[in-house]
Image: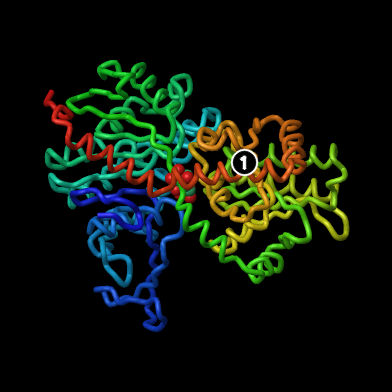
Amino acid sequence: TEGAGGPAPTGSLIVVSNRQPYRHEYETDQSGESEKTADSGRSITVDEPTGGLTAGLDPVVQQTDGTWIAWGDGEADFDVVDDNDCVAVPPDEEAYTLRRIDLCEEAVDSYYYGFSNRVLWPLCHGFPDLTEDRANDFDWYRTVNERFADAVADHADAESIVWLQDYHFALAPRMIREAVPQGTTIAQFWHVPWPGPSTFRYCPAGGNLLEGLLGNDLLGFHVDRYVDRFLECVDRFLPAATVDRNRGTVRYDGTTTQVVATPMGVDARSYDQTARSIDEEAFASLRSEHDVPHPDDAVIGIGVDRLDYTKGIPERLAGLERFFERYPDWRGEFTFVQKATLSRTDIPVYERHGELVRSEVERINSRFGTDDWQPIVYTESYLEEEQLCALYRAADTMLVSPLVDGMNLVAQEYVAASVEETGDTLLLSDRAGAHELLGTHAITIDPTDIDGIANRLADALAMPIGERRNRMRTLRDRVFDADLERWMSVQFDWIARVRNDPDRRLSG
Ligand code: G6P
């Protein structure tokens, strides 16, 4: 079958992700349109999925009558989980089951704020100095992985396809393998980079993680570089495994894992359509609510990121400061809008990073700002998809300058939303996975080269319109060709291949 999310796989699909596709707020009040009465008699206010992976996968799971298992937002006693937290979604169609695993405070602190985001996140992004290996974090990570694996086992049969998302579940695949019938296909996509052996060697319980991941039949990364590094790490740290670099396979403990690079895309058509529908009102609301100048009144550059130390925001700000120093004609003419989304603020390094970013914005604004112009408009407020697209439309250029990034979907969203023929430009870090897709027609920057950022920005703003248009047309072709639907169908093609491979699970 073909649908909004592309071809669906045969066999029931069980998706596992840390973030859930629908948030429900439980209320006692029975009024209001979006409410629904649950079996327990409570009513549920349902939010639609918002953006990204969850929005893209949702229609696929709907087609398969599948199950989605995710961390719930209820704070639970760790042992009081489950069946009352199975709900049918989406609200009006009840196409599949959303099963939420509620976690107690300690589990959240150790599994999510601990091992996932104090160890794996910095390590995978090549920041071993920022890792904090606290007592109990790994144990909780294992416990939560076990809990998710148990939940998968409740729903899986020999025809099922289990599809895990990301670094929160490195141990679960092997646990699932042990608990489900032979024939179940297990796949995982790792959305962040994979580090080289010289970094991975600092990973606590690194061998266990590799063993866990090699419980998958299929393991996907965004780009070849991460696949190569993963295979190198297995070669080096798991001597009992047999790595075939040419075929991208690993044979370990009775399972063959196919490791592939399948770069993820965005729902380009949807960004394109929303961007085309933007009207004056949307620009006006951006101005009144977020101080974003009207596109007719200023040349606008933007940055849109989670407030994360991997995104290179301080370096970008330093580049902007250098730009205003070196190219004073742009003072008063060019405004940079930085939208930052607060993230993982319980972790001190994130908190400190947020403070640094805010104080740098303030300093640069007080250095160059005038009564009627501020060089940097900074906002941490939530933007509705329409406002985000209005911001993309308002921008003449975007700076995407992560120090390391698995892919960077924001760069692709911007391109998809650049519907005007004015020739917007994209400045893109050579250290983002997205650079492999867009590098030839974006303007490449080294995210640590402050002078380079300033000069490339000046180049972008001075580029003749014909060249800008040509570049953007090519960027748009690439983003539309490699969109989310395409990514999904490539995933399911691979899943079908490993599923039909008679040699994939020889015993012993
Ligand atoms: C990255 C990760 C995702 C994660 C997202 C937001 O893109 O790869 O798994 O969901 O960041 O971070 P958060 O910690 O808020 O889920």
Q: Is residue 113 among what the camera can see?
A: no
| Amino acid type, callout 1 | Arg
Q: Is residue 99 among what the camera can see?
A: yes
Is 458 on the left-hand or right-hand side of 249?
Answer: right
Q: Answer with the quarter of the image where residue 73 lies.
A: bottom left
Provide the secondary structure element on which disc 1 rests. helix
Return the x and y of residue 68 as percentages of the image width and height.
29, 54
Return the x and y of residue 432 as percentages of the image width and height.
54, 35
Is 489 on the left-hand or right-hand side of 430?
Answer: left
The quadrant of the image that shows the C terminus is top left
In the depicted structure, whether residue 478 falls above or below residue 27: above
Colouring rule applied to residues:
rainbow
Residue closest to the eye, 144 or 21: 21
Residue closest to the eye, 44 or 273: 273
Q: Which residue is mark 1?
A: 471
Q: How many marks?
A: 1
Given the current orientation, which residue lies at the most extreme bottom position? 31
Is 430 on the left-hand or right-hand side of 63?
Answer: right
Residue closest to the eye, 20 or 104: 20
The quadrant of the image that shows the N terminus is bottom left
User: Callout 1 environment at 10 Å: few (<14), some (14 to 19), or many (20+)?
Assistant: many
In the depicted structure, whether residue 385 falls above or below residue 127: below
